[in-house]
Image: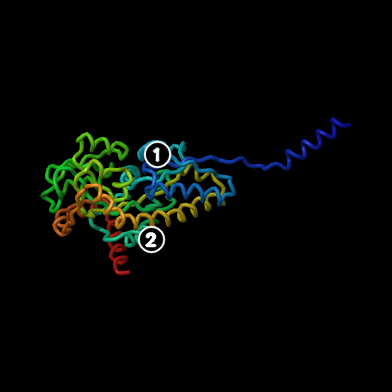
Amino acid sequence: MKTLLATVVMSATLMAAPAWAQQTLRLAHNAAPGNPKAEASLKFAELVAQKTNGRLKVVVGGSAQFGDDVEALTNMRLGTLAFSANSQGSTSGVVPQFAVLGLPFLFQELPQAWTVVDGPVGTQLGNNAKEKGLVLLAMWDNGIRHTTNNVRPITKPEDLAGVKIRTPPDPMTVDIFKALGANPTPLAFSELYIALQQGVMDGQENPLMNIYSSKIHEVQKYISLTGHKYESTPVLASKVVFDGLSKADQQAVLDAAAEAGKLNREMSQKSDSELRGKMEAAGIKFNEVDPAPFVAKTKAVYDKWQAQFPELVTLIQKEAAAAAKK
């Protein structure tokens, strides 16, 4: 009788236990600690846990711990990685339409760019991503980009002649620097610091927040405020993984990405005003740039991309013009 009673009690206990097990999902990004992308990724993980009551746990692998951006895209499409706060350049290698966000001198300030990516342009890019096995969760910010180098201050396009500039694996950035007369060379961000330190590259281009957080200013002499292009941080999910989540958990992930994006954008907008002084104090020399000759030199870049994606280029120019008036 005691054995029977014990069996009944044990069975009842097991039936009352939770019917779910916590699911652990990985998120990859390439940013250094403290960078807005890194901080927003940690916030995303925290929010996903809260919004799913612990059903989903996101483990963040920053500084390319889970592979660089290109590897992350491959692994998400295979379903072996859940999420990535990726880069616009690398994403355009899989979804080429993303490159259009980086048309030269398209955006003058960050809120203008955010208005555009949060509208019909972002919707279109989300549809394009889905066709490639990716789910666009949100569009975080990766700043307006400037040029650094160890050769000379860049004040006019001619100053870039022959300068070996590291770019992301992004055809738009390569096109821009070719048009300006530089020698653009794609290289993974994780390899950039050493390439600059060893003189393999003369310079690179990034927003001030990336330059500072990855200590690029320690191995560069000049920062020229070219403001030549904008870049987003597409926050992507594996369609294989995302489709396997419940509808409630899918919505929780989307909401978490949007909410963490607010932190990312706030930090990004603050960075330019705060970081210039810190890097000048460390010895790097800044110079302002008259954009007019740079704009003239890069007109052919628009012609090339208009031919490739006529509807999208027309749409993004229209949306950028409308956003500039707000």
Tell me the number on the disc at residue 316. Answer: none
The Cα–Cα distance between marks 2 and 1, rounded to whole angstroms, is 26 Å
Tell me where residue 236 appears, x and y as whole percent: 42, 47
Viewer-side residue, 280 vs 116: 280
Q: Where is residue 278 in the image (x, y as percent from the top left)?
A: 28, 51
Q: Which residue is drawn at 14% across and 43% down?
A: 151
Q: Indicate left or right for 142 with 3 as reference.
A: left
Q: Earlier in the sequence, mark 2 or mark 1?
A: 1
Q: Please state which amino acid type lies under the numbered disc 2.
A: Gly
Is residue 247 among what the camera can see?
no
Which percent across, then down, holds residue 162?
Answer: 12, 42
**Residue 163 sits in which quadrant?**
top left
Question: Does residue 107 appear to the left or right of 221 in the view shown?
Answer: right
Which residue matches tag 1? 72
Contact check, label 2 and label 1, Cβ < 8 Å: no
The percent coordinates of residue 34 (x first, y second) are 39, 47
Residue closer to the observer: 5 or 211: 211
Q: Which amino acid does label 1 sit on?
A: Ala
Residue drawn at (24%, 36%), measured in percent from left and top? 195
Q: Which residue lies furthest to the front in this view?
A: 281
Question: Neighbour class for label 1 at 10 Å: few (<14), some, many (≥20)?
Answer: many
Residue, x 36% and y 43% (percent of image)?
A: 32
Image point (42%, 41%), residue name: 28
Examine the rendering and report whether any part of residue 52 can be seen.
yes
**Mark 2, secondary structure of its residue:** loop
Give the residue at the far bottom of this rendering. 325
Q: In this view, does 187 lie above or below 249?
A: above
The mark found on residue 119 in the picture is: 2
**Disc number lying in front (2 or 1):** 1
The colour mode here is: rainbow
Q: What element carries label 1?
A: helix
